[in-house]
Image: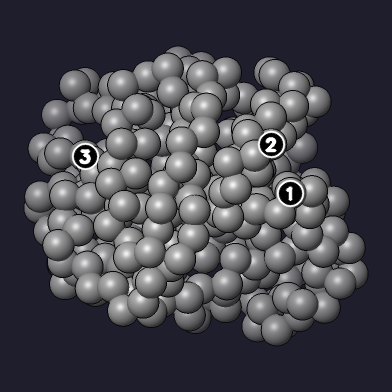
Amino acid sequence: MEKDIRTRILPSEDKEGLLYADALLLADMQVPRSDRIWLTAVPKDMRAHDFVFYLGCHVLKTTHLIETTVKILERMAIDFIAIGGPQNCCGIGDYGRGDRSQTDRTMDRLSTLVREKVLMWCPSCNFHIGRAMGDNKAARYDIEHATKFISDHIEKIQCKREITARVALHCHTGSKQQDQDAEYAEKILRAIPGVQTVGVKALSELGRHCSNNTIEKLTQGKFLELIRDMLDEARQKKVDILATIYHGCQREVCGEESRFPIKVENYVTLLARAMGIEVEDKFKKWKLIRDPEKIIEDAKDCISANNLSLDKVRATLSRNF
């Protein structure tokens, strides 16, 4: 199934197809397929689990967030599987064009895999699946964002070390869901020994998260102006770490480490670090490197293990770094 999807979307010149292709290839540059701890295709005999950790598509560009969150959930001793990738897309793009077939396929698939609750990562998927559930009779499950689930079960987390740092949360505001996600992420940060939270301006201009569509509408220049103003505020408040909530934000903001004396890390990275779990953010590493040939050298083991075309790798790097 995965091969069919790749064949279909890799030659595509449309923007959405290229975004999916880039997500798949960047994931392959970071993790050998044999080592993945998430599913992209669902075996026919897959049993139902209490929870499904639903990734969406574009978090595959930042695989460390998947691996980190899966390891946190494993420590919480819950029965779950993680699933994502374009084959399991929420269908938000097609839905906006009047076609809900992909949305229904994914929602039907989730209904066969989950007994209790689907834990959402992507804010766009969370919004879209939430609004589409009323029209899908198979969707007999609840959805909940990962921030809320981890926050509500924070007592199951055993921290082994302190993270001595002043941490500001990069928040999106203007919708109830984004405000709630920020509230729960803040609670998680405050539960980490040694962390001192510092407030910086929440950004209403950036929609649900720092997505490609949002940046395109704003223009790259305006987006960077907003982000750098926020980071300048953080610098003045002597912040050590800017904590992101969403994968798009981590992806789009992490490169600013080259301009500001502030680390950009996701809230799950900080929580996991306190638990003794560390997964390298290769996307950030490569964004700071910026040199395609040096990135290829750094990723050579995965490129070889996954038999990736160097021409396609170079094309993907040119679009993303």
* Label 2 Cα neighbours within 10 Å, binned few <14 / some 14-19 / many ≥20: some
Which mark is nearer the camera, 3 or 1? 1
Residue 223, position as x, y percentages in the image: 70, 27
At 73% across and 71% down in the image, what residue appears?
308
Instruction: Say which of 265 and 55 sits in front.
Output: 265
Q: Which residue is mark 3?
A: 143
Indicate left or right for 236 with 159 as reference. right
Q: Is residue 144 left or right of residue 102?
A: left
Q: Position of residue 318 (x, y in %)?
A: 85, 51
Mark 2–mark 1 contact, CB under 8 Å? yes
**Residue 232 has which mark?**
2
Q: What is the spatial separation of the Cα atoms under label 2 and label 1, in whole angstroms?
A: 8 Å
* Residue identified by numbered label 1: 260
Q: How far across and how far down the image is residue 111, in percent?
A: 18, 45
Residue 300 can be seen in this image: yes
- Sooner in the amino-acid sequence: mark 2 or mark 1: 2
Q: Residues within 10 Å of mark 1 (few under 14, many from 20)?
A: some
For the residues bearing labels 3 and 2, Cβ distance under 8 angstroms? no
**For the residue marked with disc 1, what is the amino acid?**
Phe
**Amino acid type shown at disc 2:** Asp
Which residue type carries mark 3?
Ile
Q: Nearer the viewer, mark 3 or mark 2?
A: 2
The local secondary structure at tag 2 comes to: helix
11 or 179, nearer to the observer:
179
Instruction: Determine the secondary structure under disc 3.
Output: strand
In the shown orientation, is residue 116 left or right of residue 92?
left
